[in-house]
Amino acid sequence: KIRSGPPTDSNHLPRRVARVGAMEATRLMFGLLLAGFVSAGLPDNFPSVTIKGIKGDMAMPLYGLGTWQYNSSRAQHAVELAFGMGYRHVDTAYLYENQVGVGAALKGMSLHREQFFVTSKIPGGLNASASKAALDKSLQDLGLEYVDLMLLHFPFDLQGQGSPAARKEQWQVLQDWALAGKAKAVGVSHYCRHHMDDILPISKVPVAVNQVQYHVGMGNAVDTANDDKAFCEQKGILYQSFSPLCGPCSPPDNTELLNGDLVTKIGKSHNKSAPQVALKWLVQQGIPVIPKTDLPAHLKENMELFDWTLTADDMRALSAATSPAVGGGPSATDSGDCGTTQEEDYPLVV
């Protein structure tokens, strides 16, 4: 019903009406937050890229903290340092056995849950019940009600064994778990085109991300080395880099992006370090990075990537580099993920 009364502009609302209006607005905002439509989100102008979430597009930070090979206490310390400096993304995994430490660090932060981004992963090759158990254990260890991004860590198990049927079964468990509100987005890691072809036709939700080893030296790598990067981009799957500084690569490749001639020379022209050049080459292409360190000076460098730009000549030179090549696989042209259509027991870089 329409009732007559005082003017209804904001300066003349009766106190009771104004109070009710404010209460309704608060309830509406709270409801929208619960529904996932409104979020406090990342800080204004935080460097991010769009990924396809369960409920629509969402922002993923362009830089974050990797935690592979850190135990729980060291991971906790690294996250505390990084987030204290302004990081808002941490990458962990069931296999890292450090999610309890990551969760403890996050719990101690004075941040709303919507203000930071957590990626985790469960092992590949698990059956339905084991997959569900690993997903639930990850949330329990992290002390969270949901993760922002949950990945299947490999398209095969730790013995290198997998099959199309097994990948389909595990993907169905992951997407159902996410649809129950446990993850805002889902994706994969180490997947190649023939692995993607197993899950894409049955997926009810977007495959948001493929997390793959990618760094300077791989700009013109063949598909078996870069895990079919062009295919991911064609399908709208965000291509994310792990080991962006080639840390797991064999010597001397594992230091080339720390002090090699090309990245050092380009860095000097911008008053930046060699690792910053290697990381900038990635983020300038919209590829998120998760370098691992617990040294404050390196944490600071790894986030100072967005107030400067590599020139077109810089980008061409870095993209043309052929060293360091992909590491961890059987050859410089094979990551070990895509070299054959039959899964084999290659050394796993996680």
Image (tube, rainbow, N blue to C red):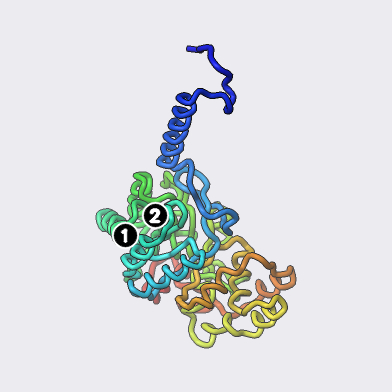
What residue is shown at x 48% (from left), y 53% (from top)? Answer: 208
Contact (CB < 8 A) between labels 2 and 1?
yes
Note whether 121 is above or below 324 in the view shown: above
Q: Mark 2 belongs to which amino acid? A: Val
* Residue 319 vertical placement versus 18 (above, below): below
Residue 138 badge = 1
Q: Residue at x 34, y 55 (%)?
A: 144
Answer yes or no: is residue 162 visible. Answer: no
Residue 155, image quadrant: bottom left
- What's under tag 1, amino acid-wise? Ser
Quadrant in which the C terminus appears: bottom left
Residue 115 at x, y percent in the picture = 47, 54
Residue 321 occupies which quadrant of the picture? bottom right
- Does the image show residue 55? yes
Q: Secondary structure at mark 2?
A: strand
Q: Residues within 10 Å of mark 1 (few under 14, many from 20)?
A: many
Residue 318: % across, % down: 66, 74
Which residue is at a point 50% across and 72% down the rendered structure image? Answer: 291
C-alpha separation, residue under disc 2 versus residue under disc 1: 9 Å
Mark 2 surroundings within 10 Å by alpha-carbon count, few (fewer than 14), some (14 through 19), many (20 or more): many
Q: Nearer the viewer, residue 350 or 70?
A: 70
Which residue corresponds to mark 2?
147
Q: Pick the residue in front: 259 or 22.
A: 22
Looking at the image, which is closer to me, 273 or 104? 104
Question: Mark 2 or mark 1, which has the lower sequence index?
Answer: 1
124 left or right of 336?
A: left
